[in-house]
Image: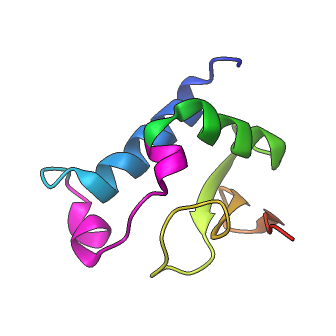
């Protein structure tokens, strides 16, 4: 696995938003019941692998298809920072 500080930061912030009651944006995520899937929560390597396999690059970011949905394999996609969708990840 190649180290990617930006991608690690995204992963860490997702975890914090969902799990850390003291995080400034927790009320938008965890307090509303939005969670991060166990596979990603427990293993940065799994999150990194998903992102790379789905076209992540440093000029892109990760978002949810449903703003009320959890952060997991089936509900996240790679997104250009300007807000134009690049690629959806869907499992058959």
Residue with the most extreme right position: 92
Front residue (pair 9, 72): 72
Front residue (pair 8, 6): 8
Is 15 displayed left or right of 75 in the figure?
left
Percent coordinates x, y for residue 16 in the rendering = 30, 47
Percent coordinates x, y for residue 33 in the rendering = 30, 74
Magenta includes 62? no
Question: Image point 32% across, 58% down: which residue?
Answer: 18
Number of numbered discs on residues = 0
Question: Image point 15% across, 55% down: which residue?
Answer: 21
Q: Quadrant of the C terminus?
A: bottom right
In the depicted structure, whether residue 51 falls above or below residue 26: above
Front residue (pair 7, 84): 7
Is 71 displayed left or right of 84 in the figure?
left
Residue with the most extreme top position: 2
Magenta includes 35? yes
Magenta residues, as a range? Answer: 24-41
Is 40 displayed left or right of 34 in the figure?
right
Percent coordinates x, y for residue 57 in the rendering = 75, 39
Percent coordinates x, y for residue 29 in the rendering = 32, 68
């Amino acid at each position: 696995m190649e180290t990617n500080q930006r991608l690690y930061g995204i992963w860490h912030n997702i975890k914090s938003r969902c799990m850390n009651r003291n995080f400034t944006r927790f009320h938008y995520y965890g307090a509303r019941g939005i969670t991060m899937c166990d596979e990603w929560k427990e293993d940065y390597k799994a999150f990194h692998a998903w992102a790379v396999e789905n076209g992540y690059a440093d000029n892109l970011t990760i978002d949810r298809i449903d703003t009320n949905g959890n952060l997991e394999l089936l509900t996240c996609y790679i997104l250009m920072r300007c807000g134009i969708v690049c690629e959806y990840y869907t499992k058959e």
